[in-house]
Image (cartoon, rainbow, N blue to C red):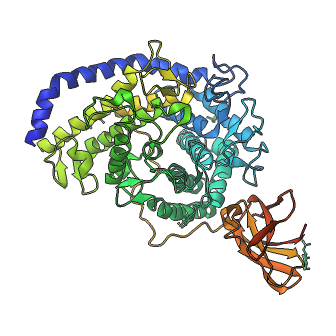
Amino acid sequence: MRALFVYCLGLSASVWAQSSTVDAYVASESPIAKAGVLANIGPSGSKSSGAKAGVVIASPSSTNPDYLYTWTRDSSLVFKALIDQYTQGLDTTLRTEIDNFLSAEATVQQVSNPSGTVSTGGLGEPKFNIDLSAFTGAWGRPQRDGPALRATALITYANWLIADGNTSYVSSTVWPVIELDLGYIVTYWNQTGFDLWEEVDSSSFFTTAVQHRSLREGATLATALGDTTLATQYTTQADNILCFLQSYWNPTSLFMTANTGGGRSGKDANTALASIHTFDAAAGCDAVTFQPCSDKALSSLKVYVDAFRTIYTINSGIASNAAVATGRYPEDSYMGGNPWYLTTAAVAEQLYDAIIVWNQTGSIEVTSTSLAFFTQFSSSVAIGVYDSSTTTYSDLLSAVKTFADGFLAIIAEYTPSDGGLSEQYSKSDGSPLSAADLTWSYAATLTAFGARAGVNPASWGASGLTVPSSCSTSGSTVSITFNEYAITVWGENIYLTGSIDALQDWSTSTALLLNTDNYPTWSITLNLPASTTFQYKFIRIYNGVVTWESDPNREYTTPASGSDTINDSWR
Ligand SMILES: *[C@@H]1O[C@H](CO)[C@@H](O)[C@H](O)[C@H]1NC(C)=O
Ligand SMILES: *[C@@H]1O[C@H](CO)[C@@H](O)[C@H](O)[C@H]1NC(C)=O
Ligand SMILES: *[C@@H]1O[C@H](CO)[C@@H](O)[C@H](O)[C@H]1NC(C)=O
Ligand SMILES: *[C@@H]1O[C@H](CO)[C@@H](O)[C@H](O)[C@H]1NC(C)=O
């Protein structure tokens, strides 16, 4: 403890100065950030002209980059923050905005788009035009976190409405929207999609974590509304997802790998964002659900933060245990690869959330997994549980508070004098970059400020969950028989390949061999995900030479249940 004691004494004056700087920033920036959020919501937001009622624009920026669209992820995270403020009585003026959001989302769910219709995968479409028509350009689609985040925002509202005696409105108007989103997750959670940065097509920790959360709280809500069949279905898949969630852990380097694909280090703000958006103080420091103060989440956070210490000029000269500017992931090259306000705020928020729980439970546990996180602040700290009566507890708590404030102090330093928050700030000199007035930047500072003040969102039922002993995949598959009429020569075979994992993602080397039981009809029967649209083609392989069927790709949508047969003929 000696080292920490000296550290605290030596830095106490600057720590005090930092804390009052952050106090001042929170006081001045809070109303600006709140106004910044509301300005970007239609129909009357001052910077969102043309947006339908309840539509959140990502940013008013319409060129370089053009963010004048509405993303399901951003909108839902923004409205979760507003719904929390409303339901916790912190801002009673937001009811109309929230009801507008609900009706905008109910509308957009029904809009056919390049990901499909409402019943064939369209809910995974990431973004829409601000008049709620489909965006039909090329994009990284689908993105499977949107329905989960929307469900979570609306479940929070629904729970409040029920407590307020308005169950009939929940049943008639809110639940149908939530039910579609949860049904989407039940069907699709075990398929890949694009990550929250819209770049990597694989499984993604953030997506899996928020899907898990939404099904848990969805099961509780379904039970409250009397639908135990759906509640059981949600719980079954939530158990499967929780099992899968554990597989992202890297036991050697002690962090959650953000994506299963993409060929990067896997160190990514994805995981800090997952932790804060699935925070449930009632679950304590549970590592299974990656709670902010869990050993796995703290270790991940350190690995993530440290990945930015040497790559940004503005971080040079900062002590190796002090806050730095952080971005999405160290390999980022978008707009030159810079820190983002919302990712730096997420680090602060995770730490404040941890402090809320330590403060509530009156102890801090240091495990072999979180040891490196804590020894940043005290080289002599040992594995153990430190009760609030010990100096180790109070020293660690204040060191983490100082560390957390450090991230907000960085945001404060690089916020321009008008308080406007863009998407990024320059790694070279901290000046604002990319889209101006990013709604998510404002929402992210507001939730971090709230956590600093000890505000914690309502529980979603993360407490006491256990991981099934073996992982099952989604139960929603259907049996599809592909018949292909094709005359072949001896030694030549017919294979199937297509656009989904189960069809080998267009690989020719791992394409699926059809059988000749009914030659000249070649056949294969596969279990494929239900309600899924995909493209496919048959190929001939003879002496290693691949011949494709002629264009266009064949397309098919699997039924919601049961089986089907497709009869094709070589072309
Ligand atoms: C229930 O909530 C809706 C949506 O805000 C509102 O229009 C309605 O008046 C409420 N009903 C009651 C009985 O509070
Ligand atoms: C589907 O679930 C299984 C079992 O947890 C897991 O091994 C597999 O990676 C998952 N695939 C996707 C794409 O989620
Ligand atoms: C810590 O707990 C006390 C008493 O329970 C409470 O007043 C205070 O706001 C809490 N602080 C934080 C940061 O959660
Ligand atoms: C496909 O062919 C099989 C066998 O020839 C036949 O029984 C079935 O009705 C056909 N299905 C369709 C959808 O054409």
Which of the 4 image quarters holds residue 547? bottom right
| Residue 373 percent location from the top left of the image | 27, 46
On screen, residue 174 above or below 345: below
| Residue 389 seen by the camera | no
Instruction: Point out the image quarter for the N terminus.
Output: top left
| Residue 220 percent location from the top left of the image | 53, 54
46 vs 18, nearest the viewer: 18
2 with respect to 170 (left or right): left
Ligand 1 found in image quarter: top right
Instruction: Point out the image quarter for the C terminus.
Output: bottom right
On screen, residue 455 above or below 258: above
Which of the 4 image quarters holds residue 30? top left
| Furthest residue in direction bottom, as rendered | 517
| Residue 208 seen by the camera | yes
Taking the spot 27% from the left edge, 52% from the top edge, the residue there is: 370
| Residue 203 percent location from the top left of the image | 56, 56
Taking the spot 20% from the left edge, 46% from the top edge, the residue there is: 375
| Residue 541 percent location from the top left of the image | 77, 74
